[in-house]
Every structure is written in structure tokens, then in C-alpha cells.
Image (cartoon, rainbow, N blue to C red):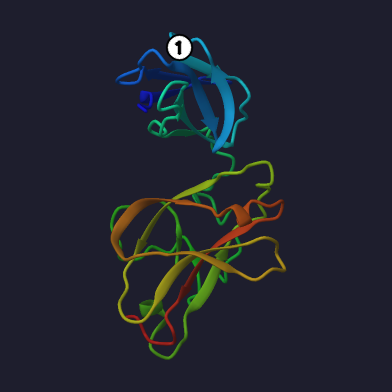
Amino acid sequence: LYPPMNLQLTQQDNSVELNWETPLNQGKDFQEYRIYKNEELYETISNIDQLSFTDENVENGFYYEYYITAFYSGTPSGESPASNIVSVVMGLNEIYSWDFEDGTQGWTILDSYLGWRWGVPVNISGNSSEYLSIDSDDAGSSYHVFDYAISPELDLSAFNYALIDFEYGYRNYSSDFLKLMYRVSPTSSWVEIENLGESASFTDQSVELPSEALTENTQISFYYDDNNVWAW
């Protein structure tokens, strides 16, 4: 039982357009296409000459995944394997943005040599603008340097998919670490999203937030800790 081939997706302003090619060997018993959306049967198309479908039941900020099968009535009968899978995040757009050019912009930091600071450059190339920094070497061997750089509260409750896109640089000198974290409210515990790897210069990074982080009062943070070992 041959599946439809080469499924493609085009995002429109308020819709998704699907296009595909006929199964390799249809046979006279080929009856219909079946379109699946987010793993559930969404639409059947009995006109086997139709090779496109437009889904207008979509909303910005939501993730949609599609595949198509073919159904046959002869011998053998039944549903084909799935086509290739295509997906989209509708209207993926920027809902919060900070560049730190004019201060911390609502982020909470210790703002001392023992934690995150604003406007204090470090010896990492690739960024000549203002940014938040933390530097165990600068503090010296007598101090334990650790701190959370905490975002304002973010209302992500209307979305089922969110990315955080950021630039960072990080030199790992010894036992220190830098982690991206989230919590669902200011009184909740921090949960690790990703342990960020070393980067000798500023680099772009995109990380998907877990579904549990999509709440009305979400906060994200960058947590650094030199583990009480001077990172010189």
C-alpha cells in the first residue's frame, strides 16, 4: 500500500497550505486521502485527483504537524503508511525582547562582582554592545561567585510553543557552569532547561521552552556558579 509522496507545507497569513504527489502505484482500488493533524485524523479527501488542501483552523503561536495517508479498498485493503511529516509554528513572532543597551530592562541581577553585572565587558569576543556579565576571575580567589540573572514575569499561557533566542559567550575554566533555567512563578523552584556549553566568542543559541514553562507568570534565568573554585 503506497503512501502519498513529497508532502510540502506553505504557511500563509492565517492558514496552512498542504501539497503532495500521488502514491507511486495507486491502482484501481485507491479510494481517498486521509490528512492527519497533530497525530489525529483531520480530513478525508475522496477526490483522488486533488493534490492540495488548505487548513484555515490555525492560530498564531501554535505548533501544527501534518502527514497524509492513502486508503485502498481492494486486496490488500487498508491504510497506507504515512507520508513524510511536515510542521509549522504559526506566526512565530517576537513577544518579548531585551538588548540591555540602556540597562537591565527589568531583569534582576546582583549587580556586584559576586554575581551578574550590567555594562561590565569581559574578555570574550563578538559583542561590542552592552550586556550582562559575570566573572569569577575578576572577583578573585577569596570569593564564591554565583547568581541568577532573572527575567521579568512572562505571560506565555496563550501559546503551546515558545523559543528563547539569545547570544552568549562562556569560558569554562574549571568546575564552573552556566545553565538556562525557568520557573512557573516567582515563588516556584527553578528547573533546568539546558546546561550551556563553552563558547570562546559570542554565539547565537535557540532553545525551545518546555510545555510546563508556558504559564502566566513564567520567568527564565541564566544561572552561573563557579562552585566556589576560582575560575581564573
Closer to the camera, 46 or 76?
Answer: 76
Crowd class of label 1 (few under 14; some 14 to 19; many from 20; radius 10 Å): few
Q: Which residue is the extreme one toward the bottom?
A: 142
In this rendering, the answer to whether 221 lies above or below 90 is below
Q: As shown in the figure, which amino acid type bears the numbered disc 1?
A: Ile
Q: Which picture quadrant has residue 181?
A: bottom right
- Image quarter hosting the C terminus: bottom left
Q: Which picture quadrant has residue 191?
A: bottom right
Report the side of 158 relative to 26 (left or right): right
- Which residue is painted at 69% across and 68% down in the image? 188
Does residue 127 appear in the picture of this structure? no
Q: Which residue is mark 1?
A: 48
Q: Position of residue 59 (x, y in %)?
A: 62, 29
Does residue 84 appear in the picture of this structure? yes
Q: Position of residue 225 (x, y in %)?
A: 46, 77
In this rendering, the answer to whether 188 lies above or below 80 is below
Q: Position of residue 29 (x, y in %)?
A: 42, 16
Q: Position of residue 128 (x, y in %)?
A: 35, 51
- Which residue is painted at 37% across and 28% down in the image? 1
Q: Which residue is the extreme one toward the front?
A: 75
Q: Secondary structure at mark 1?
A: loop
